[in-house]
């Protein structure tokens, strides 16, 4: 029984996930003062806006932050 539960759990945890992703625009380097290799993009993922940044310092890293907007006094995710 123990082995069956391990197999079932591994099947539940392994799977493919797809998202509709597209780059809306590349943010010009003039808008932020960083390393010449740094990049920033405005992307649309499943109909919501995100900003994706790739920072090249000692250890390259990337971040993704979701845009929010205020509608009727509520903070809601911004749509593309």
Image (cartoon, rainbow, N blue to C red):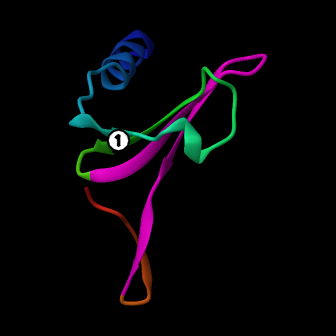
Count neighbours of disc 1 (C-alpha within 10 A) and say few if under 14, some if 14 to 19, many if 20 or more: many
- Magenta-tinted stretch: 48-71
Vertical comparison of 37 with 78: above or below: above
Q: Secondary structure at mark 1?
A: strand
Q: 69 or 31: which is nearer to us?
A: 31
Prevailing secondary structure class for the magenta stretch in the rendered image? strand
Q: Quadrant of residue 61?
A: top right
Name the residue located 67 percent from the left edge and 21 percent from the top edge.
56
Indicate whether residue 61 is drawn in magenta. Answer: yes
**37, 46: nearer the viewer:** 37
- From this viewpoint, which residue is outermost toward the top? 3
Query: In the image, is 54 to the left or to the right of 60?
Result: left
Residue that carries the numbered disc 1 in the rendered image:
43
> In the displayed structure, would residue 50 be above or below residue 20?
below
Query: Where's residue 41, x and y in %?
Result: 43, 37
Quadrant for residue 77, please give it: bottom left
Residue 4 coordinates in the image, percent (x, y): 35, 14
- Is 29 left, or right, of 15 in this rendering? right
């Amino acid at each position: 029984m123990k082995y069956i539960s391990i197999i079932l759990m591994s099947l539940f945890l392994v799977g493919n996930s797809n998202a509709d992703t597209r780059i809306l625009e590349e943010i010009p380097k003039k808008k932020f003062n960083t390393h010449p290799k740094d990049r920033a993009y405005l992307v649309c993922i499943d109909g919501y806006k995100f900003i994706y940044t790739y920072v090249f310092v000692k250890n390259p890293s990337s971040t993704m932050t979701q845009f929010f907007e205020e509608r009727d006094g509520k903070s809601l995710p911004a749509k593309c």
